[in-house]
């Protein structure tokens, strides 16, 4: 029993610290979206999908775990590096960071109802209202 | 131009019901002092560290928090269909926190690649020129002073911005033109000539191209302008002429290997003779701590021309998700006699940068 509890605790612990991130789009979005394009979209370097339609990226609160995980794995930047990167663009009129939504549920709802949206959520929180294009 | 801009700004601002106004900002609270310095006895200048030339951020042996502290607010009104109006107001300790419009422009996104902007903007000469005030965006206390010595840092005009990509490379650039008439230029009036100096840069025409991939970034730029100057109302003559042509060339290369990064800049201003500036910085990220070492120099191609360099060491600590603490030691060597700027100095400066 004790062993089982320990195993459970370890499992839960690792599940929270190594949470996976899922990148989601609207189910009707048929574009090829790879890790390189995701990186470009979320750093403001790509403004459209391969079919030419405009991208509408959404992020989550900068202090949330899923955002930190996404920044590290998908953008290869720490949250403060990313903030420094965006402040350089924002205050020189060269770009605007993706809009921040409150949590996984808010991103899910937004992406499910917006054809050109792309967002990220904790893997496992997705449902059939969206399409997962990448997992980290 | 100014009236047209005002009318356009009023026109855009008078549609408040359709506009979504975003407010963002940045602030730096910095302090420091000269530990030891020679000053410039021949010009009666006490031991001084000129940390920022254009706004005359001068530290002396008395600890002060005024030279580099600043507070900036940016307002962006987003109208529909790619049109926006942006204003940036900055209050600087060096100007007794007098709030001034530093940027005021209208931006129109033509398509995914091109954006046209018109109004008052920062002159994008050096790599860090147009975000010079946003300390949070870079590693040092300030962009290296020996390089960023220019008296004019804003202009009124038109800017076309481009962004695109080729394979793994992102390409961005801009072409701009305009003029600036600074009736009481701070650097020239208060520091160099100690008399009211009007500095005019007209027929400004410049271009910037920047390419980057995952780890490397290269920026090249060229700008030319026509200079006119009045000291105490009297036109300055250069070789008997009231105007002179300036040509600026700049190359910056930054490499980021994940934790280790290298920042470099090479610039030349040709004003009849050459004024060369160069900078190299090495930094390493240890989680939230980033120690760095930097060397920057300014060299005028002339006998006893302006000639100074700075060795800097410091650390940036990202202690909060929107704030960084920095501390930096600077060792300045001023080698010219006639064109001495502020003499040799060793100083310590520190502060907090935030963005919101």
Image (cartoon, helix red, strand yellow):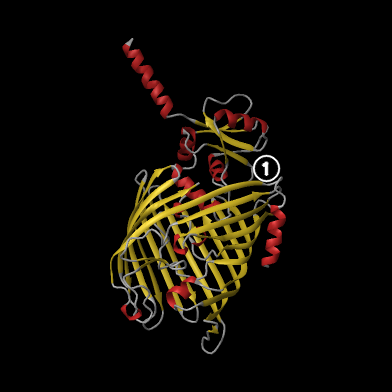
x and y, in percent, of residue A121 in the image: 54, 31
> How far across and down, in percent of the image, does residue B63 sit?
33, 60
> Farthest residue in the top direction?
A1
Q: Is residue B108 above or below residue B335?
A: above
Q: Is residue A77 left or right of residue A132?
A: left
- Residue at 61% across, 59% down: B104
> What is the residue that sits farthest to the left in this orientation?
B36
Is residue B315 visible to the viewer in this orientation of the structure? yes
Does B176 sit left or right of B212 as displayed?
right
Looking at the image, residue A1 lies above or below residue A79? above
Q: Nearer the viewer, residue B136 or A10?
A: B136
In this rendering, does residue A77 appear at all?
no
The residue identified by callout 1 is: A51
Neighbours of disc 1 within 10 Å: few (<14), some (14-19), many (20+): few
At horizontal 30% and vertical 68% (from top left) the residue drawn is B345
The quadrant holding residue A94 is bottom right
Q: Residue at x 45, y 42 (%)?
A: A79
Measuring from the top left, give residue B262's x and y in whole percent: 39, 56
Residue at the image position 43 percent from the left and 55 percent from the top: B255
Subunit of mark 1? A
Q: Secondary structure at mark 1?
A: loop
Specify the quadrant of the image occupied by residue B121.
bottom right
């Amino acid at each position: 029993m004790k062993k089982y509890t320990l195993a459970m605790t370890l499992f839960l612990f690792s599940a929270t610290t190594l949470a996976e991130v899922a990148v989601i789009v609207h189910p009707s979005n048929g574009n090829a979206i790879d890790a390189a394009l995701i990186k470009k979209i979320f750093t403001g370097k790509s403004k459209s999908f391969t079919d030419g339609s405009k991208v509408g990226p959404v992020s989550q609160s900068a202090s949330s775990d899923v955002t930190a995980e996404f920044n590290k794995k998908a953008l290869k930047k720490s949250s403060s590096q990313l903030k420094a990167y965006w402040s350089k663009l924002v205050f020189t009129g060269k770009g605007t960071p993706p809009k921040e939504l409150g949590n996984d549920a808010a991103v899910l709802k937004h992406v499910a109802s917006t054809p050109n949206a792309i967002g990220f959520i904790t893997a496992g929180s997705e449902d059939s209202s969206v399409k997962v294009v990448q997992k980290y | 131009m100014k009236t047209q801009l005002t009318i356009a700004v009023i026109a855009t601002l008078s549609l408040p019901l359709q506009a979504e106004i975003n407010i963002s900002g940045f602030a730096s609270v910095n302090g420091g002092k000269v530990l030891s310095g020679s000053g410039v006895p021949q010009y009666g200048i006490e031991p001084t560290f000129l940390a920022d030339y254009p706004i005359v951020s001068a530290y002396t042996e008395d600890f002060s928090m005024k030279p580099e502290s600043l507070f900036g607010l940016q307002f962006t009104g987003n109208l529909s269909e790619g049109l926006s109006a942006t204003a940036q107001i900055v209050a600087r300790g060096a100007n007794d926190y007098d709030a001034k419009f530093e940027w005021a422009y209208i931006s129109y996104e033509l398509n995914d690649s091109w954006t046209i902007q018109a109004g008052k903007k920062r002159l994008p000469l050096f790599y860090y020129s147009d975000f010079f005030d946003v300390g949070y965006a870079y590693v040092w206390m300030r962009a290296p002073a020996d390089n960023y010595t220019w008296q004019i840092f804003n202009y009124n005009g038109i800017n076309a911005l481009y962004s695109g990509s080729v394979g793994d490379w992102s390409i961005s650039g801009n072409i701009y033109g305009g003029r600036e008439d600074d009736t009481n230029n701070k650097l020239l009036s208060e520091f160099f000539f100690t008399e009211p100096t009007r500095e005019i840069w007209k027929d400004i025409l410049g271009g910037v191209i920047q390419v980057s991939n995952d780890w490397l970034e290269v920026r090249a730029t060229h700008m030319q302008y026509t200079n006119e100057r009045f000291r105490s109302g009297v036109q300055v003559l250069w070789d008997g002429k009231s105007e002179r042509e300036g040509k600026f060339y700049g190359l910056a290369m930054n490499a980021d290997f994940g934790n280790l990064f290298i920042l470099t800049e090479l610039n030349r201003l040709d004003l009849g003779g050459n004024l060369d500036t160069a900078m190299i910085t090495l930094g390493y990220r240890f989680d939230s701590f980033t120690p760095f070492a930097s060397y920057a120099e300014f060299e005028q191609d002339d006998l006893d021309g302006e000639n100074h360099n700075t060795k800097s060491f410091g650390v940036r600590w990202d202690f909060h998700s929107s704030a960084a603490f920095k501390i930096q030691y600077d060792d300045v060597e001023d080698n010219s006699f006639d064109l001495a700027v502020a003499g040799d100095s060793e100083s310590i400066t520190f502060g907090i940068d935030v963005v919101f």
